[in-house]
Image: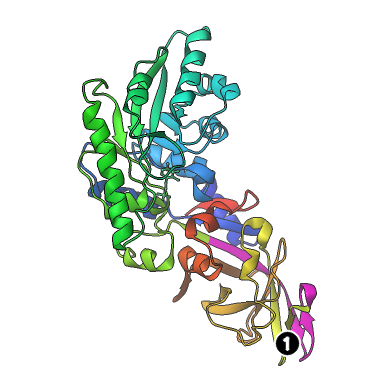
């Protein structure tokens, strides 16, 4: 699989691919080792590869992590788990989200581990596990709500939680919670997070006699690992940090000497147009040239996951350096006009050497210049996680 991908990268550089993602697997391995170094030695990483591994390509990323010896993965839903199995990913696959009872047979068929999202859901899982003509126990992780109020049986419901561990047909292999504010560095967020952590461990201590020692405890996602280094954890669930990024440019910058971005996003120049002053380009006449301008058409658009909000707003005829840019020939070229579904336009007046087939960088390095996914997300008013997870299936994914 890897070798074909490398060949494809060469062929795409020879003018075939329209728009593509390049994956730097050295960076992925580096990030895994760095995150592992922050956790106790016995702690197993359960990389979160939901949303097509945050747009990177779940099969490629999980395959590389499997080669590194990782044996547990997290996904959001059953269909994502099924896709990993189709890509021959072995080991534990934990479904973090809600699984509908109609989908319970798929858990067996694809050897997926569901989350019991609360006591009622645990009962439903148990009645499925008992009545189907099943021989073995159904492995389940139990979600505990310690303050996020999204999924999980409330940590205070000791009796109900104790009962979950006694339900027939189930083998509870994990118990976890999710931190709501681990990214915040203000005192309120820190206090809230410590209260969540305390509530989880107090519950674990109270249940100690009732739960088997093989039940794995976990609570940290990326920010939890980086900001709350806990010792009493059996697993951790990093998502965004695994891909070398944090949610915004400031946090990503703080860790830029420790985490390395895995993904670059590139497209091509399709054609070049000369505009006279007063001529407009793109939809809605949103951009009008005020001087003789060269505009290049780039082969990527919002259907590929590039936010349309990157478009230069009509008022901002004075191009700001940090509104949407692409890199061409190692220089920044401002995006002009509305981003289209499959294409966008960039002002390349400063680049007389531009020609069709040239490679444009939307995320990544080109010569001395670079655009990070986190700064692009900031520019679009979103977070890195959303930007990346929207990168669509039309993009080719290539291993460097
Ligand atoms: C998405 C998710 C993660 C990973 O979060 P990051 O902030 O990307 O590391 C971990 N745990 C749960 C329950 C999640 O939903």
Looking at the rendered structure, the number of numbered marks drawn on it comes to 1
Q: In the rendered image of this protein, does residue 146 appear above or below residue 157?
A: below
In the drawing, does residue 234 fall left or right of residue 98?
A: left
In the drawing, does residue 155 fall left or right of residue 285?
A: left
Disc 1 secondary structure class: loop
Based on the picture, tell me whether residue 272 belongs to the magenta stretch. yes
- Residue 282 picture quarter: bottom right
Residue 107 image offset from top left, x and y in percent: 51, 23
Say which residue appears at 49% left-offset and 14% top-offset.
127
Say which residue appears at 50% left-offset and 20% top-offset.
124
Q: Can you tell me whether the CB of the residue at mark 1 lies under 8 Å from the nearest atom of ligand 1?
A: no
Along the line of sight, the residue nearer the viewer: 210 or 87:
210
Along the line of sight, the residue nearer the viewer: 265 or 355:
265
Along the line of sight, the residue nearer the viewer: 260 or 355:
260
Colour approach in the figure:
rainbow
Q: In the rendered image of this protein, does residue 99 appear above or below residue 48?
A: above
Q: Is residue 6 visible?
A: no
Q: What stretch of residues is rendered in magenta?
A: 265-284
- The chief SS type of the magenta part is strand
Based on the picture, tell me whether residue 379 belongs to the magenta stretch. no
Residue 14 image offset from top left, x and y in percent: 61, 61
Q: In the rendered image of this protein, does residue 253 appear above or below residue 1?
A: below
Q: In the rendered image of this protein, does residue 92 appear above or below residue 315?
A: above
Q: Residues within 10 Å of mark 1 (few under 14, many from 20)?
A: some
Residue 43 image offset from top left, x and y in percent: 26, 38
Say which residue appears at 41% left-offset and 24% top-offset.
140
Q: Is residue 179 visible?
A: yes
Residue that label 1 marks: 289
Say which residue appears at 21% left-offset and 31% top-offset.
205
């Amino acid at each position: 699989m890897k070798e074909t991908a490398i060949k494809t990268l060469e062929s795409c550089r020879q003018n075939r691919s329209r728009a593509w993602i390049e994956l730097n697997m050295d960076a992925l391995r580096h990030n895994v080792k760095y995150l592992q170094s922050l956790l106790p030695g016995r702690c197993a990483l359960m990389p979160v590869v939901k949303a097509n591994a945050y747009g990177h390509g779940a099969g490629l990323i999980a395959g590389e992590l499997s080669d590194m010896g990782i044996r547990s993965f997290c996904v959001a839903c059953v269909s994502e788990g099924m896709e990993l199995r189709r890509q021959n990913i072995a080991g534990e696959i934990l479904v973090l989200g809600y699984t509908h009872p109609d989908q319970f047979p798929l858990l067996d068929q694809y050897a997926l581990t569901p989350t019991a999202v609360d006591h009622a859901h645990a009962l439903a899982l148990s009645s499925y596990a008992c009545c189907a003509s099943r021989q073995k126990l159904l492995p389940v992780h139990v979600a505990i709500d310690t303050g996020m109020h999204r999924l999980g049986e409330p940590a205070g419901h000791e009796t109900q939680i104790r009962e979950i561990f006694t339900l027939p047909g189930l083998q509870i292999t994990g118990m976890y919670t999710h931190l709501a504010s681990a990214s915040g560095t203000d005192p309120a967020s820190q206090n809230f997070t410590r209260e969540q952590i305390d509530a989880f461990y107090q519950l674990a201590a109270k249940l100690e006699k009732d739960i088997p020692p093989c039940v794995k405890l976990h609570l940290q996602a990326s920010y939890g690992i980086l900001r709350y280094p806990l010792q009493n954890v059996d697993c951790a669930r990093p998502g965004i940090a695994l891909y070398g990024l944090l949610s915004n440019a400031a946090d990503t910058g703080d860790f830029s000497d420790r985490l390395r971005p895995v993904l670059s996003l590139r497209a091509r120049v399709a054609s070049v147009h000369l505009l006279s002053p007063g001529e407009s380009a793109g939809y809605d006449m949103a951009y009008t040239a005020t001087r003789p301008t060269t505009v290049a058409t780039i082969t990527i658009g919002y259907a590929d996951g590039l936010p349309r909000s990157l478009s230069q707003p009509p008022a901002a005829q004075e191009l700001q350096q940090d509104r949407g840019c692409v890199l061409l020939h190692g220089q920044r070229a401002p995006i002009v006009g509305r981003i289209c579904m499959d294409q966008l336009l960039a002002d390349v007046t400063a680049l007389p050497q531009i020609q069709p087939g040239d490679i444009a960088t939307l995320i990544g390095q080109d010569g001395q210049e670079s655009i990070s996914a986190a700064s692009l997300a900031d520019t679009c008013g979103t977070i890195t996680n959303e930007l990346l997870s929207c990168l669509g299936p039309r993009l080719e994914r290539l291993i460097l």
